[in-house]
Image (cartoon, rainbow, N blue to C red):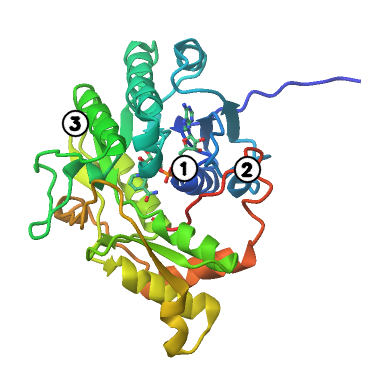
Amino acid sequence: MKAEVQRMDFRRTVLVTGGSGFIGSHLVCSLVNGHPEWRILNLDNLDYCCSPKSLESVQDRRNYTFIRGDVCNSRLVNHIFSTENIDVIFHLAAKTHVESSFESPSSFQRVNVDGTRVLLTAAHQARHRPQRFIYVSTDEVYGASLEEGFDESSPMRPTNPYAATKAAAEYLVRSYWDQYQVNKGMVIPKFLTHLQMNKKCTIQGILPISRHFLYVSDATSAFLLLLEKGIVGEVYNVGTSCEIPIIQLAKELVRMVKNVPESEVNDWLQFVPDRPQVDLRYPIKCEKLQQLGWRAEVSWAQGIRQTVKWYQDNPNFWSDNTKGGPVNQNQA
Ligand SMILES: NC(=O)c1ccc[n+]([C@@H]2O[C@H](COP(=O)([O-])OP(=O)(O)OC[C@H]3O[C@@H](n4cnc5c(N)ncnc54)[C@H](O)[C@@H]3O)[C@@H](O)[C@H]2O)c1
């Protein structure tokens, strides 16, 4: 019997950190499926909020490799860069839940800032020099605005520890390579999960809070476009004009999930005290990205319908998560 080891030659090696998370897993799937000639490495420590099940469809593909590990572990990260010829890095690994960032800011600082520094240093020192380092930041680094939209030159004024660590990391990245940003909205999974458990949607405070929503496939298409057309060293906002008041969002979800008469919609809302600092809205301008040819393809109505359907079709998706994490997200 003769065994033969075949070395596959790939045209590009792409490292995605946080590739088992919400956005990361969509990005990994689209890279693995869309580019069989590229080797895709996913470095993720499977923190409580990860969604590895989203990667089941690609886990046996020959151009995909999962590395379970901590982005702050410089020995591991240096080892990856010395043994693989990494051409492109998408850095998404992060602690992402704003609420928890008030309770344990140091863990946010460790992962979001130190982790970014470790990765930048390893990439910078790598024998095989990467072509691109794309850092995914957040609209929250700009703070809130009632009037003006933020463009890429707007000052960063973060108002919670999560956003502060993302801003610190962004400054670090700016001092090395290029980066860009994406919109945030974990409120949808929270409301949907509550409604599926026959619990009410909890609305924090009484202020007219709204958020901008972008469907995850539109976010990943922006990443891929920036990989090809983004100018190195530039910052790109990834945004949307789709702004929805949180209370309207809750009511829409109640109507879609609970199917109750209009007179009973409010019965599914519960007002709870706000956290100490809350930003009313994060308007983002993204003309710069649009000039490269990017447009959001999925409308609000279509995206929210697909998201609700996904939750209805996958009711136990999170329940056997190894870490038992309760909160996840399916629409950015
Ligand atoms: N979801 C949004 O709407 C949104 C909006 C704006 C910005 N972002 C940014 O996009 C990126 C991805 O967000 P997401 O919503 O997919 O987050 P997520 O919480 O779903 O995923 C984060 C991933 O990072 C991994 N991770 C955490 N700590 C790690 C560590 N020390 N080492 C290796 N992996 C680690 C987790 O296991 C998880 O898989 C984040 O950087 C976030 O700040 C997200």
Q: Are marks 2 and 3 in contact (CB under 8 Å)?
A: no
Tag 1: Cα neighbours inside 10 Å, few (<14), some, or many (≥20)?
Answer: many
Q: Give the CA distance from mark 2 to mark 1.
A: 19 Å
Going by the numbered disc 3, the residue's amino acid type is: Gly
Mark 3, mark 1: which one is toward the viewer? 1
Residue 114's place in the image compared with 208, above or below, is above
Mark 2, mark 1: which one is toward the viewer? 2
Residue 163: name its quadrant. top left
Q: Give the CA distance from mark 2 to mark 3.
A: 39 Å
Tag 2: Cα neighbours inside 10 Å, few (<14), some, or many (≥20)?
Answer: few
Residue 26's place in the image compared with 89, above or below, is below
What mark, if any, has residue 24 been given in the picture? 1
Which mark is first along the chain, 3 or 2?
3
Mark 3 CB lies closer than 8 A to ligand 1: no
Taking the image as four quarters, which one is ligand 1 found in? Answer: top left
* Residue identified by numbered label 2: 324
Q: Give the CA distance from mark 3 to mark 1.
A: 22 Å
Q: Quadrant of the C terminus?
A: bottom left
Q: Are marks 3 and 1 in contact (CB under 8 Å)?
A: no
* Residue identified by numbered label 3: 233
Tag 3: Cα neighbours inside 10 Å, few (<14), some, or many (≥20)?
Answer: some
Q: Position of residue 49 (x, y in %)?
A: 52, 42
| Residue at horizontal 55 percent and vertical 70 percent from the top | 309
Residue at the outermost front position? 273
- Whether residue 299 appears in this view of the structure is no
Q: Secondary structure at mark 2?
A: loop
Q: Secondary structure at mark 3?
A: loop
Residue 74: name its quadrant. top left
Mark 1 CB lies closer than 8 A to ligand 1: yes
- Residue 270 or 238: which is nearer the viewer? 270
